[in-house]
Image (cartoon, rainbow, N blue to C red):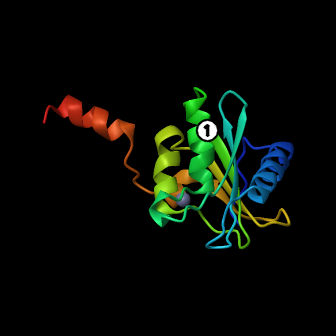
Amino acid sequence: MREPSQDMTEELRHQLIVAALRARERAYVPYSGYPVGAALLTDTGAVYTGCNIEIASYGATVCGERTAAFKAVSEGERVFRAIAIVTSNGAAPCGICRQVLYEFGPSMTVMLATPDGEITWEGPLSDLLPLGFGPHELAEGQRAGS
Ligand code: ZN
């Protein structure tokens, strides 16, 4: 496990993991049987939860992390601070979710945990998505004029 992030208190970690655990209980996963729960903290202090939702037409399936992210953004949030993700094996988010999180929190903290609340990894999103492509790239490209 990495060195814990300085701006995350133990209480905050616990709060996010408990929220992610509860969200995981609501996962709709009739096909994979792999429930995921996520709890996303924004810069306003609000927490948004999400679970994965599988659809019989598989391409319409959405991950728990993106459910939480889109709930937050649709409520007006624009800056992500941290996310706790609970899976049976403490897995890291998929590439699509890393990209979505990067849009609103390139320096956010990611915590991965198992259902017993053990944090298996904690670190900055930039460790999961090095050299990420985000809004700044488009802004720089526009200034470059081509
Ligand atoms: Zn994902």
Q: Residue at x 67, y 70 (%)?
A: 34
> Residue 108: x and y, percent?
59, 44
Viewer-side residue, 100 vs 144:
100
Quadrant, the C terminus: top left
Kind of residue sitting beneath label 1: Lys
Question: Residue 40 falls in which quadrant of the image?
Answer: top right
Reply above or below: 108 against 88: above
Question: Residue 1 falls in which quadrant of the image?
Answer: bottom right
Indicate left or right for 36 with 55 as reference: right
Q: Residue at x 81, y 53 (%)?
A: 22
Q: Which residue is mark 1?
A: 71
> Residue 36: x and y, percent?
68, 61
Image quadrant of ligand 1? bottom right
Mark 1 within 8 Å of ligand 1, using the beta carbon? no
Q: Residue at x 72, y 41 (%)?
A: 7
Viewer-side residue, 55 vs 78:
55
> Residue 103: x and y, percent?
46, 41
Question: Residue 46 falls in which quadrant of the image?
Answer: top right
Mark 1 is surrounded, within 10 Å at the Cα level, by few (under 14), some (14 to 19) or many (20 or more) other residues, namely some
Q: Residue at x 37, y 48 (%)?
A: 133
Q: Helix, strand or loop at disc 1?
A: helix
Q: Answer whether residue 62 is visible to the viewer in this image.
A: yes
Q: Answer whether residue 108 is visible to the viewer in this image.
A: no
In the rendered image, the residue lying farthest to the left is: 146
Reply above or below: 85 against 47: below
